[in-house]
Amino acid sequence: MAPQQLEKEEHSPAERPFARQLARLERWEKLTYLAFVMPALLLLAVLFVFPIIKFLLISVFDPTFTLDNFVRAFTRPVYLRIFWKTFEISLMTTLGALFLGYPVAYLFANVPPRVRNILLPLVLFPFWTNILVRMYAWMALLGHNGVINQLLVNGNLIGEPLPLLFNRFSVLVGMIHFMLPYMILTLYSVMSGIPNELMQAAASLGSPPWKRFYRIYLPLSMPGVGAGCLLVFILAIAFFVTPALLGSIRETMISQVIEREISEAFNWGFGAALSLILIVITTTLYVIYNRVMSIEKIHGE
Amino acid sequence: MKNRRQVNPTLALVLASLFLFTVMLTGTAGAKPLTAEGIHNALAKYRGESLTITSWGGSYQDAQRKAYYEPFSHKFGIKIIEDSPADNSKIMAMVKANNVTWDVVDAGSYKCDNLGEEGYLEELDFTIIDNRDLLDGFWSKWHVATIAWSELLGYRTDVFSGANVPTHCTDIWNVEKFPGRRSLRDNPIFNIPLALLADGMGVHEIYPLTEAKIQRAFNKLDEIKPHINVWWTQGAQPPQLLTDKEVVMATGWNGRISTLKKDGVPVDVVFPGSQLVGDSWIVPKGAKKKELSMLFIAWASLPENNWELSTMIDYGPVNKKSFKRLTDETLANMPISKVEQSIICDFSWWAHNYSDMVERWREWKLQ
Amino acid sequence: MSSYAAGHSQWEKIKLLVFYLFCSFVFIFLIMPNFIVVPISFSGARFLQFPPKSFSWQWYLNYFNQGEWVRATIVSFEVAILVTFCATLLGSLAAYGLVRGRFGGKAVINSFIISPMVTPILVTAVAIYKIFSDLRLTGTIAGFVLAHTIMALPYVVIVMTANLRGIDIEMEQSARNLGASRLTMLRRILFPLALPGMISSALFAFLISFDELLIAMFISSPTVSTLPKKLWDGIRTEINPTIAAVSTLLILISVVVLVAAGLVRRHFEKQTK
């Protein structure tokens, strides 16, 4: 009896227009937020998504409908191996960049602005150096007769030069070096929003340093960690210049294959198929990332 | 009495057609390509126009500019607009987009037939271009070679000197006699024929490649694979690797390694066992200045024009008549002078099999 | 108690020292290649050589003498600055809408927005080339700006969404409740809070555009070309040491600009005081 009465009260004539107004406001709110997204979306849809889809369709219309390209990608073991290798290297790069970048970002967020303004350009230095020159610099540093080996051998620290170049190590060095600025800046942009007072308050309440960090700072910096790792990982997957110039043939990454298929072997259909697989995988990762980040936010609140 | 003076109309018609037909036949069959003078005259009407030529940039294009583009521009009053690099995927994208902005392109010879047969190139007009004196195999209906150069072995002379120098490109397999770090290209086009040579085949037996030969080549490559420290992908790498002494032996392209020698770096090249390849002029399908492109190619292939580049870089002319214009000293460094000891690349075989070979190479290298 | 405190602070000092050492190592790692590049740019050899055996200004002269190097640099800067504005603006707005808004289809919209980042660059170049050809945008500054903005958008969105998620919506809501219009609220409350994120995004956008090579190779023309494309010229035969000179010049310019910006800021701060 009572619930029905309540229902009747909610829908009393006096309240119906209010409910409608509320609904209209909500819709207006929704539309406004959508409007913010529109310009970027339109630009991308017209000048990017549409042409890319046309290109990717070549993977199945090569020229008539065929699934051969995808069959080839999935059945020949070499491609699965290359995909795996690509993810392996990207993951290692991401973790390396996080490990090196987190402390530096923390430093940036917690030093006075004057110091920060001196240190910040250092983070941007890699960008001013063209990738070709950077590759050569790593060769000169890590090479058989490079700076590091010469120092070690002439200083009698080792007998034989170390194999620091043209292997997994040099590829990771090259890639992490490229990615670090992205990781540091992304982390910093979130960390700078974490108020110092929080940590000070916790300290004054007697919380030991490691606990303060683990329970307060780390969780608050998570959006930055997530974004930084995602950014670096996705960037790393797309790399092909660095592995080609600094790695051995065991470090072949999928973008090198796609590049070769399109510009040397003229297999646009196969190249498109591999690209599509790559796009699907990375987009899925991004969607998962967003889900996780949204859920965390809700739980955090 | 009746039709003595009148000619039988049917017979006349038949005879006339036969006559015309024969004239036409001999006319086209005997249609000689334009002579130098013919080319000059044809180019006169293009005075004031422009032509877009795309090549590879860097010192190669600088040399081409001095040897071809500037003289051509000067002589005929035609502006040459240069672009670079001559990327195949851009050619394909241009043709597909119906927006061909390049008229003449310098491309690796082994890609040309493939590009042409897939519909991306204009067929060359041999009533304009004279191909009779060009090296065999260095032209087809899709391309005409502009230079001939070698993929060969380079090595450090401060490591291997005196009696102990590599004398054949296959010496890279000999790790006992020539120890040290080495580099091969991450590409099958020279490695497969070289492996066959290393396995005992003669330079003339290499092409056409068969399944058995390819298998044999990969087996031979398995031997040297663990000793290769660097697999290079860009043409600029081998000279840099040798300069830095990162490796002591590397396969590479003769022009650039020879230039290092001239610059005083202790390197030298080994011609025996090298593979002769080329770069060719092609015209993308739908190029706006089609006839002018043909005329340019014809002009650049004339013996009096085809030799000047060779004085600047050690790349050989492809017109047999041009050799006379080079000094003996220059010729000695030309890949062309070592033809008997070189493998002559079969461009058309590679054009048809490149895609498969790339995949097999990929599988082999990741084993 | 005091001995515990003293010992405690010693341990703290050690940890701090280790922390600073670690950060210094990372900084050195970041700028190490530049220690190689700068000397090379003064090399007298005709190829890359380290350490250089002779001194010469030839590569700097080469850069300034050849009009196309300087032209390409100007185009690169022009495009990059425009891209910075467009990408940061569009991306920040989009991020704001995505983080605050509650509408369906977010997964699809998100995928659209990051698609340039997850698509192999050669595929992007070929696809964009086709549509730009149809629209007559190849070989134009506008074309470059549009293409690079597309490439930079995902980065801006990712950084800004991370940033905005950390900003409490309650601040915006209270401002609105107190009577501020949406515009005022954005300008006075959100913008200052989002500034660090926007600066990072702007930097990303600038550098992505400035360093971008592959799309540039496709949509440039002999007259409108960017620096990275020029730097790759001739890679088939040699690595032109002019690129070492260019890199050194760029670092010099960036240092000068930052110092100048710092001085300007301090001047203004003094004035407002």
Image (cartoon, rainbow, N blue to C red):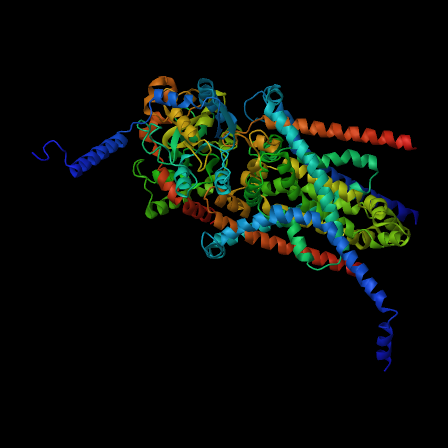
Residue B75 appears in which quarter of the rendering? top left
Q: Indicate the quadrant containing the N terminus of chain B: top left, top right, bottom left or bottom right.
A: top left
Let me know if residue B39 appears in the view. yes
A173 or A67: nearer the eye? A67
Q: Residue pushed farthest left?
A: B1
Q: Residue pushed farthest front?
A: B2
The percent position of residue B141, horizontal first and vertical second, equals: 35, 36
Left or right of A221 in this view: B108: left
Left or right of C238 in this view: C252: right
A76 or B262: nearer the eye? A76
Relative to A60, say whether B164 is above or below. above
Let me know if residue A224 appears in the view. no
B271 or C72: nearer the eye? C72
Left or right of A89 in this view: A10: right
Residue C106 appears in which quarter of the rendering? bottom right
Relative to C20, say whether A298 is above or below. below
State the residue at coordinates (64%, 52%).
Answer: C112
State the residue at coordinates (62%, 26%).
Answer: C71
B67 or A4: nearer the eye? A4
The percent position of residue B193, horizontal first and vertical second, equals: 37, 39
State the residue at coordinates (36%, 17%).
Answer: B327
The percent position of residue A162, horizontal first and vertical second, equals: 57, 38
The percent position of residue A224, horizontal first and vertical second, equals: 74, 49
State the residue at coordinates (58%, 29%).
Answer: C223
Left or right of B243 in this view: A107: right
Relative to B277, say whether C161 is above or below. below
Relative to A123, say whether A272 is above or below. below
